[in-house]
Amino acid sequence: APLALPRHYTLYETSAPELSAPWWTTFENEELNTLMAMALKENLTLSEAWARLRQAAALHKSRSSALFPTLSGEAGADTTERGGDTTTTSDTAYLGLAASYELDLWGRIRSLKEAEGERLLASRADMEATAVTLAGEVCQTWIDLIATREEIRLVTAQMNLNQTLLAALERRFENSLISVVDFLRQRKVIEQQRAEMPELAERETILENRLALLLGKPPGQAPPVTTHTLPALGPLPATGIPADLLAMRPDVRAAGLRLKAGEWEIAAARADRLPALSITARARFSSDQVQTLFDNWFLNLAANLTGPIFDAGRRTAEVARARAQAEESLALYRRVVLTALTEVENSLMGEGHKKETLTALNQQLTTSRLTLTESERRYTQGVTDYVTLLAELKELQSLERKIVQERALLIKKRIALYRALGGHWPQTLTGAPPSSKG
């Protein structure tokens, strides 16, 4: 049954502007643009995809050559001795051309050529899908690195604040205004934050090395990331209608092209069960003496008609195999299309829910700051103990870190949406990185 596509997405914006430039330019960050350009030029996984595309192009050219006659040269020399009363020796030399051509009576050769042509286009779409994945991974790694550094700066600032509070508590303890327990509790908070710093530093290094790998660089040799704050999000991109994914998603196009290739394979397998007509021609110059090589020549023209009589069901089985392969390609195509629709829906819903989460967290942060201010006043007046104040302080500092993490996740939801939509920018990629020659 035909695959029924929904008329529109659950969340969509009809007035959103069409995205003509690559999606990462919406972040308006030249550093990110530079990293993307470098990745699309030097990433090794993308270089592998370009190499596979060149292989497919060569194979397509090879299959296309079967539509034309083949011409080959031949040359040789023979020495013959005849015995008897007297021994005679004769030298024969020949030089000639041989041509052969299979008439494509039933379209078998052309079907194979068309199938290979569809696979060539699918290989191009595979390369574009690799570029889409690469762009998303570079941007996500860049966002994670910026967020991690923001978190490191935030924890450092929180530790400095806690150190100031600890110094104030130490003075109050020396004046017998608080118990040693309050002093130790505050020091424990600082020690907990100090214990988290190595893990954050390790995450930063891992992200730097991952970015270098995506750029085709050894660890430590990637361009430095100097952006200090997470970029702001613009409006949602125009998602179009679900049917647009059939053209905008390179993985969907690749699956569809391989489905077409399977149909041509079935046609070729069917034609292979019919008789084949081949024509051969040979022109040869020959002579018993090399000096008179071109004095004698002959032309031979032959046509051969061959057809299967008994092959133990091999050709019939080949047709069945081609049909089963086409059915597999059809199921794969349907799965890829449904996966693409699901990814767009999940990205749209995910961004909406993440924005709601951030709104609630920012409101909670505002309330937490007011609560901390009131707790400080009440603690100074001796109405509440330090445990209450410390709990409010820890909650506030935890919220500040969580908001940084959630902001990064929100941006990554948008990146996931861009990846899910695909877009036309990969189709503008031209040429492959120059291959190294040993």
Image (spheres, helix red, strand yellow):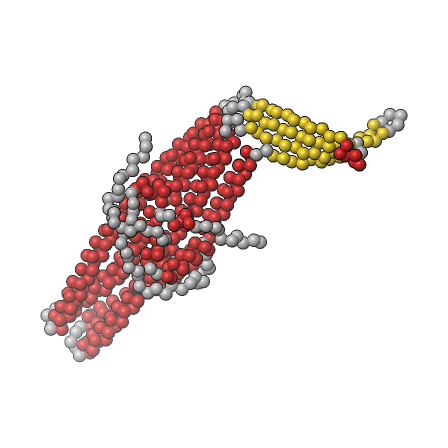
- Looking at this view, name the residue that lies furthest to the top: 309
> Residue lying farthest right?
85
Q: Is residue 349 left or right of residue 336?
A: left
178 with respect to 152 (left or right): left
Residue 237 picture location, percent across and down: 29, 51
Examine the image and state in which quarter residue 256 appears.
top left
> Residue 122: horizontal and vertical position, in percent?
43, 41
Question: Which quarter of the image is occupied by the N terminus?
Answer: top left
Q: Relative to the observer, which residue lies in front, 229 or 285?
A: 285
Of residues 299 and 172, the one nearer the viewer is 299
Which quarter of the figure is the C terminus placed in?
bottom right
Percent position (x, y) of residue 42? 46, 55
Taking the image as shown, residue 69 lies to the left or right of residue 256, namely right
Which residue is pictured at 50% across the width and 26% down the height? 106
Would you say residue 305 is visible in this rendering?
yes
Residue in the image at 43% along x and 61% along y: 222
- Front position in the image: 435 or 375: 435
Identity of the residue furthest to the bottom in this view: 175
Residue 124 in the image: above or below residue 173: above
Q: Is residue 43 above or below residue 223?
A: above
Residue 318 visible, this orientation: no
